[in-house]
């Protein structure tokens, strides 16, 4: 049985482009009955939400965020859940903006102390 994401806090391992999530962004995940959702904030993001589904180690979700400059953006992401040797969780993500051009890949990992800078 894949490990639940419920209650885990994850953070990017590297900064993305300005106006996107970065190493100061924190995602708090929730999971129940195949549904996943999270709230996130930090860095250039004032408030973000994601919602979607999980099948095994595959997440498929949409996200929307409000940035510090007052603009909003949204997109789609597919992630693979990986358990690290130390027991923490990593999400390997492929994402694409739906509200503007662009996309890419990113990695977020579980933080245990709440801080990674």
Image (cartoon, rainbow, N blue to C red):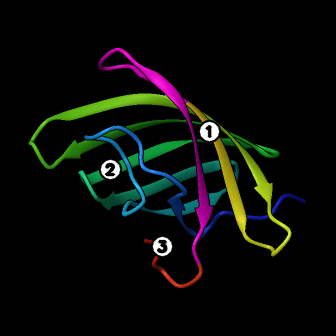
Quarter where residue 10 is shown: bottom right
Residue farthest along the right direction in this orientation:
1
Q: Residue at x 9, y 42 (%)?
A: 70
* First-in-chain label (2 vs 1): 2
Q: Position of residue 41 (x, y in %)?
A: 31, 59
Check the picture and name the quadrant holding the C terminus: bottom left
Decide: few, some or many residues near mark 1? Use Cα within 10 Å; few <14, some 14-19, many ≥20.
some
Q: Nearer the viewer, mark 2 or mark 1?
A: 1
Q: Nearer the viewer, mark 3 or mark 1?
A: 3
* First-in-chain label (3 vs 2): 2
Quarter where residue 73 is shown: top left
Q: Which residue lies under the disc numbered 1?
A: 93
Relative to 90, say whether 115 is above or below: below
Label ID, residue 73 = none
Q: Secondary structure at mark 1?
A: strand
Q: Residue at x 62, y 39 (%)?
A: 93
Residue farthest along the left direction in this orientation:
70
Q: Which residues are magenta?
A: 95-111
Q: Which residue lies under the disc numbered 3?
A: 116
Q: CA distance from mark 2 to mark 1?
A: 17 Å
Label ID, residue 48 = 2
Q: Secondary structure at mark 3?
A: loop
Q: Residue at x 21, y 44 (%)?
A: 66
Decide: few, some or many residues near mark 3? Use Cα within 10 Å; few <14, some 14-19, many ≥20.
some
Q: Position of residue 55 (x, y in %)?
A: 77, 41
Check the picture and name the quadrant holding the N terminus: bottom right
Q: Position of residue 106 (x, y in %)?
A: 56, 41
Q: Nearer the viewer, residue 38 or 23?
A: 23
Q: CA distance from mark 3 to mark 2?
A: 19 Å
Q: CA distance from mark 3 to mark 1?
A: 19 Å
* First-in-chain label (3 vs 1): 1
| Magenta span main SS | strand
């Amino acid at each position: 049985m894949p490990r639940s994401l419920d209650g885990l806090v994850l953070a990017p391992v590297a900064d993305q482009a300005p106006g996107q999530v970065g190493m100061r962004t924190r995602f708090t995940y929730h999971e129940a009955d195949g549904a996943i959702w999270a709230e996130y904030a930090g860095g250039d993001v004032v408030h973000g939400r994601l919602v979607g589904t999980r099948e095994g180690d595959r997440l498929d979700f949409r996200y929307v965020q409000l940035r510090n400059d007052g603009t909003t953006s949204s997109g789609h992401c597919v992630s693979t859940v990986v358990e690290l040797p130390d027991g923490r969780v990593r999400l390997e993500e492929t994402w694409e903006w739906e509200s503007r051009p662009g996309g890419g890949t990113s990695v977020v990992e579980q933080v245990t102390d709440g801080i990674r800078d």
